[in-house]
Image: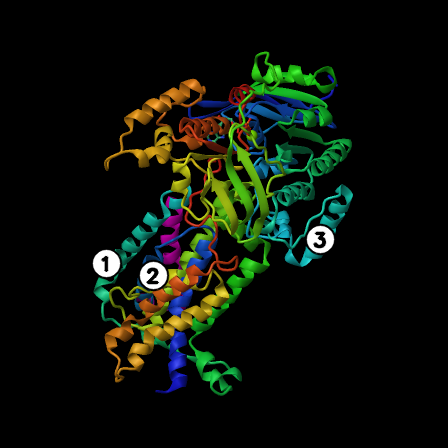
Amino acid sequence: MDMVSFLSATVVAGTPLLYATLGEILTEKSGNLNLGVEGMMLIGAVAGFISAYTTGSPLFSIGMAMIAGAAGALVYTFLTVSLRANQVVTGLTLTIFGTGLSSFLGQKYVGQVVPDNVKNFFKPLNIPVLSNIPFLGKILFSHDILVYLSIIIAIALGIYLYRTSVGLNLRAVGENPSSADAASININLYKYINLMLGGAICGLGGAYLSLVYVPTWQENITSGRGWIAVALVIFASWNPYKAIIASYLFGGLDIIGFRLENAVISKYFLDMLPYLGTIVALTVFSAKKSRKNSPPKHLGLPYFREER
Amino acid sequence: MKERVPLISVKNICKSFGTVKACNNINLEIYEGEIHTLLGENGAGKSTLINILSGVYMADRGSITLMGEEIKLSSPKDSIKYGIGTIYQHFKLVDAMTARENIILGQKISFRKMRDVDLKIAELCSKYGIELELDKHVEDMSVGEKQNLEILKVLFRGAKVLILDEPTTVFTPQETEKLFNIMRKMKKAGCAVIFISHKMDEVMKISDRITVLRKGETVKTLIKNETNPKELTELMVGAAIDLSIKKVDAKIGRQILKISNLKVNDDDGTNVIKDISFSVREGEILGIAGIAGSGQRELCEAIAGVRGVKHGEIVFDGEHLEGKNPREFIKRGISLGFIPEDRLGMGLIGTMDMVDNLLLKSYQTEDGILINRKPLAKKALELVKKLDIKTPGINYPIKNLSGGNIQKILLGRELGLKPRLLIMAYPVRGLDITRVILFTI
Ligand SMILES: Nc1ncnc2c1ncn2[C@@H]1O[C@H](COP(=O)(O)OP(=O)(O)O)[C@@H](O)[C@H]1O
Ligand SMILES: [Mg+2]
C-alpha cells in the first residue's frame, strides 16, 4: 500500500470529523452539550447538496449549509437556553429531526451527482512551494480548499478561546455561569452566538461529505460521524488543536477498511475500527483526570439566575 | 446627616420565593462615607436584599434610588454600571481559571494590555496590603485566598457602593483586620460600605450605623455608638433572651474513642491531617478549633468512616474501625452532623423532601423489600413541631429551605438515632440564637 496516498486520504477522511468536532467544542465550551451534531451535519449536507445541484454555485452552497446548521442550533438554543429544556433530550431530538428532514428533502436527489463546476471548485490545490516538500507536501499541502479552511478554523478557534477576552468570557460562561453573570457577562447572548456558530461549523462538516467527499447524495450520508465527533471532543479534551490530530487519527481508522481490502483481517472488523477506537479512547481519556482535560464544569446544566 | 441625600436608598422592597417572603417591605438609606451593617438571623433576608441590589434577583416590588434618582437593576451588569461592587456570600469565582483571569473577566481588556493590568493589580495589592499570586488557579487556593481574590476583583473595577456579604467567615482575625482597613479606606474615599456579619464583636468594631432585619422586615436602624450588643440581639430575635450558655454536668465515663497517629488525605490526595492523636470519653465534649480549611472536614469524615484513612488507628469502644465501611460506623452509633459551607454537601439531599432524607439513614434497618414511609412521615412532623422548622410541608424539597432550617433537619435526624458519638462541624452556623441555646442545653 502506498503510504503517502493513504495518509493524504486520511486527512480528507478526517476533515468532516474535524469540522463537527470543532463545532461541538465551541458548543460545549459555552456550557451546552448538543447531541444534535449528527442532525446538524445532515441538515447542512442536504442544504449544501440541493443548493449546489440547483444553482451550481459552490460558495452559495457552503453558505447555505452553514445557515442550515446554524438554524438547527438556533432551535436547540432556544429550547435549552431560553426555555431551559433538558439538553440531552433536545440534542437527541435534533439528531432525529435532522435525519428525517435530510432524507425527506434529499429524496429526489438520491444518486445524483454534484455539478462539475462545483466539483472543480473543490478539487485539490497544490500550495506552491509547500506542496513540493517531499513526503509531507503531498500529505498536507495538496488538498481542496475546505481541508485548508478546517485547519484555519481550528487555529482561529484556539486563538479565540485562549487568546482573546471574548474567549475568556465564553469559557467562564461554560465553567460557572453565575460567576460570569456577576462579572457582567451576558450569558444568553454568548450562548446564542456561539452555539449557532458551532452549528454552522457542523453544517459545513456535513456539506463536506455531500459536496466533496462522496460527492453524490445518499441517504444518511454522515453514517454516525456526528456521534464520533461528540466522542472526539472528549478525546481532544476540548482543545481545537488536539482536535486536528484526533480527527485525522479517526479519519485513518475510517478508511483503513478500503485500503486493506485484500488483507487477511475481516472487512467487518476493519469497519468496526472507528467505533472501537472511540470506545477505547473514551475509556482511557476519561480515566485520566486533570485540569487540562476536564470538561467545562457547567456542561449540560441549565442556568437560571435566581436559582440557588 | 439628615439633610444629605442618601447615596443609595431602598424603598419598600419585597421579594418572595414561592411561599417564602424573603424580603417584606425593606427600607434602607445608606450615605456616603459610612459603614452600614445589616444584622439579622439566618434567613432574615440579608443576602436576598444584597442580591437585589446587585441585580441578581429582581425585586417583586419597591424601588431603589441612587443619589436621589430611581434606578432599575435588571442584571448584575446594570448594578456594576452604577458603581455597586459586591462580594457575595458564596464565591463567584471560576475554579479552572487563574486569579488574573478572574479579575479581568467580563471587562473589555485587550490581552496585549496585560502588563497594565498586572501593574494596576500590584498597585492595589500594595495599597491595601493584600497578597495574591496572580497565576495561581482558583481551585488550588485556600478559602482565605479566594476571599482576597473576591475583594481584589471588586477593588479592580472600583466601586461607589461596596457590599460585603459575610466576608469574614473564612478569615483569621489578622485577615479580618486587613479587610477592615480596606473598608475604612473606602469609607474615607467617600464610598458607602454595606457590611454583613454574624460576629457581634466585628459589628461593634467597624460599623457606623446598624440596620436590624428580622423575617424579611427592617426592624430598626441604630447608630452604633448609641446601642449595645444586648439591644441588638433582642432586636434580631424579637424577644429578650439570656445569652449565657448553661453547661450541664455530666458524668465523665470511660474512654470511647481513641485516635492515634492519624493521617488523612483530602480529595486531591494532599496530606491534610498529619499525625493527629486524641481521645474522647463518654459525657465529654471535645472542641476542635482552627480557621476554615485546616483539615476539620477531612478529620470529621475520617472519624465518621466516609473518608479513607492513610495511616493510623481509629479505635471505638475497644474496636478497630479504620478501613471499615461507613455502615459499620453508623451501626456502632457514630453519627456525623456535618455542616459544610454549602450545608447540603453532606448528609442531606437537596432535591428530596424531609421524609426521604430521614429515610436515607434508616432504611437499612427495615425488613422487607419495600420501604414504608409512614413512620418516618410521622417522625418528620414531630421534628417540624419540636424544632420549629419552617417549611411549607414535609414533602417539600429541602434545598429551598433556609440554611438554618436545613440544619435543624440534619441535627434532628442525627439526634433521633440516639448516637453514642456525635460529630458536628459548624453545627451552629446558620442557626438563630434561640435555637443554639436549645441545643446546648
Ligand atoms: N434562590 C432562592 N430560592 C428559594 N428560596 C430562597 C432563595 N434565596 C433565598 N431564599 C430564601 O429566602 C429566605 C432568606 O434567605 P437569605 O436572604 O439567604 O437570608 P440571610 O442571608 O439573611 O441568611 C430564606 O428562607 C431562604 O431559604
Ligand atoms: Mg446570607
Label 1 near ligand 1 (CB < 8 Å):
no
Q: Which residues are magenta?
A: A54-79
Dot 2 crowding, Cα within 10 Å, few <14, some 14–19, many 20+: many
The numbered dot on residue A227 is 2
Q: Separation of disc 2 and disc 1 at Cα?
A: 21 Å
SS under mark 1: helix
Asked whether residue B7 appears in the rendered view, the answer is no
Q: Quadrant of residue A214?
A: bottom left
SS under mark 2: helix
Q: Amino acid at mark 2?
A: Trp
Q: Amino acid at mark 3?
A: Asp
Label 1: chain letter: A
The secondary structure making up most of the magenta span is helix
Q: In the image, which is nearer the foreground, mark 1 or mark 3?
A: 3
Do the residues at pointers 1 and 3 share their chain?
no
Residue A94 is situated, as x and y percent measured from the top left of the image, at 32, 52
Q: Which residue is mark 3?
A: B118
Q: Residue at x 50, y 58 (%)?
A: A290
Dot 1 crowding, Cα within 10 Å, few <14, some 14–19, many 20+: few
Q: Which residue is mark 1?
A: A104
- Asked whether residue A71 is drawn in magenta, I would say yes
Q: Separation of disc 2 and disc 3 at Cα?
A: 43 Å
- Asked whether residue A70 is drawn in magenta, I would say yes
Q: Is residue A139 left or right of residue B221?
A: left
Residue A307 is situated, as x and y percent measured from the top left of the image, at 46, 35
- Depth check: give the residue in front, B259 or B242: B259
